[in-house]
Image: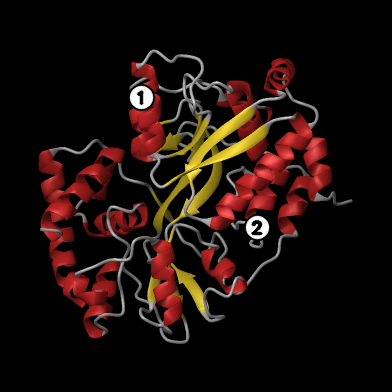
Amino acid sequence: MRLSLIALLSLGLATPAFADWDATLAAARGQTVYWNAWGGDQRTNDFITWVGQQTEALYGVKVQQVKLTDTAEAVTRVISEKAAGVTDKGTVDLIWINGPNFLSMKSQGLLHGPFVADLPNARYLDLGPTSPASVDFTVPVEGMESPWRLAKFVFTYDSARLPEPPPSMAALAEWAAAHPGRFTHPAVSNFMGATFLKQALIELAPDASVLQAPVTDAAFEAATAPLWAWYDGLRPNLWQGGATYPENQSVQQQLLNDGAVDISLSFDPASAAAAIAQGLLPETARVFTPEIGSIGNISFVAIPFNAANRAGAEVVANFLLAPATQAHQQNIDVLGSFSVLDPAKLGADEAAVFAALPSSPALPSLADLGPTLLEPHASWMTRLTEAWAERYTK
């Protein structure tokens, strides 16, 4: 018999797996968790609101989203608090974090933990040493941050205008030359623009394996030489001649919807299906990835070392890993983000909830998305965006 999402929430979360968890739940009751998270996507903001409603009803733990334009804002706040001697009453309880920001906080001893193994719902994760849930931009997580959503880089296009999208980054440059002004990418200062460059770098680098190690001057020069040659050819054919760039992926999606460009970018494979449902893209919108695959990663949440509401933050992190929460999140009518859970560790009732989720012609399967390419080491992204700015913004 299939159980409803609400029934699964009650069943899967009301009885913690570990004896110590009872103490955590008791300490968390009455706390308000200040979750610092990027606020640029309304569907994500709505999901975080829903999470707070559920955790308050189940555990007496409220969630207050602190909307960020850049995760570094929260990191800087924690650094400032540590410098000021604030060791237990910090203003940041939970951070949506990845890559360079996680590396920075981990290396400076700014994180609470390890705590992930103590979460009852961690039993649904693959926590092997090479699992995506255990590595963040090549940096071992070591229980210092908890997974909550799966992301993968995709291209969105209007199949009515572009029947056969380019199968590679090299082919994209050729297509742009034949269709000048019909493609662009977000500013490289934005995460999406930086990801576009990393995707090209992985395809074009003579030896992509070097990207998994911290960047060096020699490795950077050798790996990026083909990238800059490729981009020099692409840039004149970009929208506005490459003189200006959309501020973020939402702006670029609007350009696609308006017919100003033929391709947009996203780190959410369900974004096209969601946008169609909202009337933000035509019914003919679809997504594709290059033949070699595309960059993918897991989004994590971390708890600062001085969080005032650490118990509440752990309760929220655990709730995010509940199968019912992950299924609700994966629903394209809600958020559409693929689950971070290991399907092999789900029970029959839990798997049935995922199987019953709505679909859409614009929603790809995991198989449709092809191989997942590993993120380069976090130091490559910093160096890459700085070099791009030096070359193309002067």
Decide if residue 324 is on the left or right side of residue 140.
right
Task: Please name the amino acid that badge 2 sits on.
Answer: Val
Q: Which residue is mark 2?
A: 334
Say which amino acid is labelled 1: Ile
Q: Position of residue 311 (x, y in %)?
A: 62, 22
Image coords of residue 332 (percent x, y): 63, 62
Q: How many marks?
A: 2
User: From this viewpoint, is residue 191 visible?
Assistant: yes
Q: In this rendering, is residue 140 above or below 165? A: above
Question: How does the figure colour the protein chain or chains?
Answer: secondary structure
**Residue at image coords 70%, 65%:** 358
Residue at the (27%, 45%) spot, across then down: 381
Q: Which residue is mark 1?
A: 79
172 lies left or right of 94: left
Camera-side residue of 69 and 187: 69
Q: Residues within 10 Å of mark 2 (few under 14, many from 20)?
A: some
Tell whether 290 sits left or right of 368: left
Q: Is residue 337 above or below residue 137?
A: below
The residue positioned 89% from the left and 51% from the top of the image is 1
List x then y, in percent, for residue 368.
Answer: 52, 65
What is the secondary structure assignment of the residue under circle 2?
loop
Q: Is residue 139 in sight in this rendering?
A: no
Residue 119 in picture, x, y percent from top left = 64, 26
Q: Earlier in the sequence, mark 2 or mark 1?
A: 1
Q: CA distance from mark 2 to mark 1?
A: 34 Å
- For the point 74% across and 49% down, which residue is it? 351
